[in-house]
Amino acid sequence: LTLPADPGAPRFDADGPYAVLHLFPGGLRSHLKQWPLARWAEVARGLLDRGLCVLLSGAPADAAGNEELLRAVGSPRVRNLAGCTLTDTARALAGARVVVSVNTGVMHMAAAG
């Protein structure tokens, strides 16, 4: 997946290689696909320990949940991208070393890249 450079796109501010985590599914019965926050925190810490920055993707409605994870992990190398455009999310996925996602469209985008 190659997207043209967009000078107006947000900077991901990743200090080196990064991972993208997508915590929240959408749609009917989405709660059945969610992991507990503590498990996401374990994943994020493991990625940080391996030298990766962690970007949290999501819809605007996911921003507060992502902030909860930011507080739980407590690292400035974790950034909240919730609310980015779909194009910006695709850019973040394309540059990621690893993507961990619940079963949702973002997972399919990452697999297609």
Image (cartoon, rainbow, N blue to C red):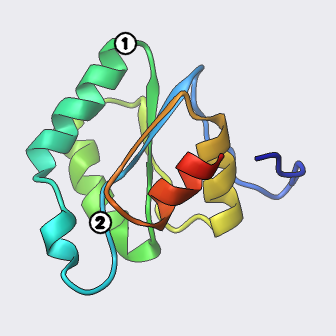
Residue 99's spot in the image, x, y percent? 45, 40
Farthest residue, direction front: 112
Dot 2 and dot 1 residues touching (CB under 8 Å): no
Q: Residue at x 21, y 42 (%)?
A: 40
Q: Identify which amino acid the numbered label 1 is placed on.
A: Arg
Residue 90's spot in the image, x, y percent? 65, 55
Q: State the residue position of label 2.
A: 64
Let me know if residue 74 appears in the view: no
Farthest residue, direction top: 50
Q: State the residue position of label 1.
A: 50
Compared to 6, does 12 lie above or below? above
Q: CA distance from mark 2 to mark 1?
A: 26 Å
Check disc 1 and report its element: helix, strand or loop: loop
Residue 80's spot in the image, x, y percent? 44, 51
In this rendering, would 68 be left or right of 59? Answer: left
Q: Identify which amino acid the numbered label 2 is placed on.
A: Ala
